Amino acid sequence: MATMELAAGTSDLLTGAHTLVVVARKADLADGWPLAGLPQPIRDAAARLAADAKPGAGAVSTLLPTDQPRTLTLIALFDKVSRHVSETRSYEIYAALRSAARAEDGKVAIVLGLGRPEHALGALYGVVRSYPLYSRKTGNKNGLGRVHIALQTREGPATFSAETFAQARDALSLAQRLVDMPTAELDTAAFEAEARGAVQGIPHVTVHSIVGDELLSEGLRGLHAVGRTAMVAPRIVVLDYAPPGSEGSAPIALVGKGLVYDTGGLSLKIVGERMLTMKCDMGGAAAVLGAFQLIARSGSPKRVVAVLSMAENAIGPNAYRPDDVITMHSGKTVEINNTDAEGRLALADAASYVARKYHPNVLIDAATLTGSQLIATGKHHAGLVCNDEGLEHLAVAAGLQSGDHAMPILFSAELHVPEFKSAVADMRNSVADRNNASASASGLWVYLHIDDLNLRWLHVDLAGPAFLDNRGTGYGVGLLHALVTAL
């Protein structure tokens, strides 16, 4: 684990550092400006090393004739990126840095060469996610280290608020840590406690929860069915940020899928690879919680209500079954044809609840909803399903701004509602044909429970980018924060 902060200057950056890492575009490393202001021996060594630095090929390192730091590492980024990839280079930085500069028992100094000053936050997100907090390793294999970061542009050092960085760092690291925690440590009760702790002391925030059989009295029968047989009860946790001046205004609603584990229920996942890593199935709720914390701590003037829909899809004598018919919070009936399509039940109930109780004008849900999202948009771009073109454009732009890539997929009730046709209920919960844009259809399914309401809706399926190489990434915190800020 490592602590991270912005360096106050060159002396602060280098003092006590065992490694200096410089991250910049290949052409900029050749020009040398990212090392401006550093001691001449370091600049000379970098000039010799820069020719060996190749984008996508990992880091290159050399020993320095100095004690602090002793090692210089260069990471070359691609000079250009395609139009669907963020210029902040958040993912590129993360992919290169996570294996190049560990901070286990000392200090690492990092210089980020920015193409433009406004790329700073996205680039910093890339650094933060390279140093996840969760570890249960023994033997001091993951000790307490320090990371100091300096931001450099061609015109000179870039200024960035230390407070803003600390808030963003804490929010992203919170989401990462929660996704990495196994369910033995993060059941639904522990997740609620984490949520309450994350917002404790933040002005203008209130929290309440609806737990276990209380869900039935509120009409949240879909969520209740999914989690009722688990050892720890299902619940929703409602976080309400209402700053002065927001009274009477329609809030922005954020809804997160918080399945702390998904066995598939009676539609059991094949034991092994399909069930392994299902601790990550609460990545949407983790992203919503991190974004909510960041929004509230930063003093946003907008009212935001976040709902975390928590359950464990377990197996037991009271498990819900294929062929059951459930009346959802929306009043619509659902015939269960796949208990492994449980996340949409939890998500749709929470969306209907917040939409009808708080009357938002925008509702954004985030979920590790489908494996087919990876087929539709890949491991590094979330899939967006949206009923409003303007909101969709804002979401794509927020992804490029934050470095949390996102791409639109189909929104088409005409084509996809028939996938859920039921002989005995209003709909089934899983598609008939997985080859018919099932990621889009599954997102649409959530919307079908609020389609009678006049609101702008966006679904973010982040199954791929939320969990890469068996680690949580904190994906979604930056995207949701940037999007709410832009609304």
Image (cartoon, rainbow, N blue to C red):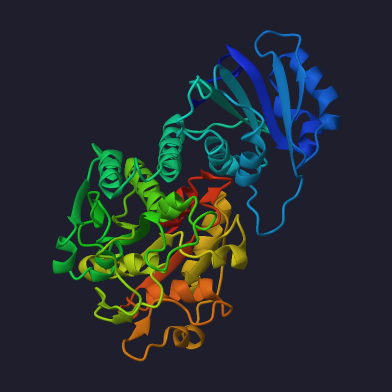
Picture residue at 50% right of the left edge, 63% below the top: 394
In the image, residue 177 above or below residue 409: above
Given residues 231 and 212, the one toward you in this image is 231
Residue 224 picture location, percent across and down = 24, 65
Q: Is residue 198 above or below residue 355?
A: above
Q: Position of residue 156 (x, y in %)?
A: 66, 29
* Residue 163 drawn above or below residue 445: above
Query: Relative to residue 188, is residue 104 drawn left or right?
Result: right
Q: Is residue 38 visible?
A: yes
Is 7 in front, or is 238?
238
Q: Is residue 116 visible?
A: no
Number of numbered markers = 0
Residue 384 is left or right of residue 304, and the answer is right
Please identify the quarter of the rendering in which residue 186 is found: top left
Residue name at image x 25 percent, y 47 percent: 189
288 vs 142, nearest the viewer: 142
Is 136 situated left or right of 90 in this image? left
Q: Quadrant of residue 37?
A: top right
Residue 20 placement (x, y as % from top left): 66, 21
User: Which quarter of the rendered picture does the C terminus lie within?
Assistant: bottom left
Percent across and percent down for residue 118 are 57, 43
Q: In the picture shown, does residue 173 fall above or below 261? A: above
